Amino acid sequence: MSSRCSAVQTVGGESHLHRLVGTQQTVLVCGTDDRDRLYGRLPSQAPEIDGVVYLRGNAPVGAIAPARVTRASTYDVHAEIVSSAPVAGVDTATQCLYIPPPL
């Protein structure tokens, strides 16, 4: 991929993620990374391609929890778990897949 294409993708990604700051998003809690940080993914974040959501608070791995986005970087967002209660109306049989930890 050319450096110009990468630069355009980075700018587009940054603006998209920064628009999420202050909003409540649904997050799949995936586990902890090698630095023992709890992380999850938004429905728009693909494993091994997109960034992750680093989470503050407690929720079990596999939970689909609401979280308020507090800040964003180029590829990742940071959020606080609002509630560890499952999000109503989510079909976990079709919407939860194994998500490997971030690289």
Image (spheres, rainbow, N blue to C red):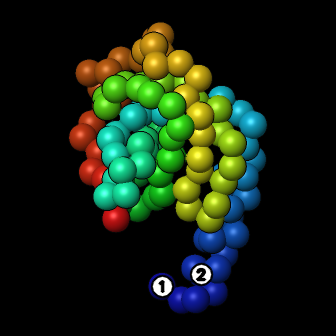
Whether pointer 1 and pointer 2 mark residues with C-beta atoms closer than 8 Å, the reply is yes
Q: Which three-letter amino acid code belongs to the residue tagged 1?
A: Met
- The residue that label 2 is drawn on is 5
Kind of element beneath mark 1: loop
| Point 70% across, 69% down: residue | 11
Residue density around tag 1, few if under 14, some if 14–19, many if 20 or more, within 10 Å: few
Q: For residue 63, say whether it is visible.
A: yes
Image height of 5 relative to 82, above or below: below
Q: Tell me the residue at 45%/13% (across/down).
A: 85
Q: Is residue 54 left or right of residue 62?
A: right
Query: Which residue is rendered at x = 27% and y = 51% of the image?
Result: 100
Q: Classify residue 29 as left or right of residue 79.
A: left
Residue under numbered circle 1 = 1
Residue 1 vs 69, above or below: the answer is below
Can you say whether 85 is above or below 51 in the image? Answer: above
Disc 2: CA contacts within 10 A as few (<14), some (14-19) or many (>=20)? few
Q: In which quarter of the image is the C terminus?
A: bottom left
Where in the figure is residue 66, as x and y percent of width and height?
55, 24
Q: Is residue 10 left or right of residue 90?
A: right
Label 1, label 2: how far apart the Cα atoms are:
7 Å
Residue 20: percent from left, percent from top: 70, 43
Q: Which amino acid does label 2 sit on?
A: Cys
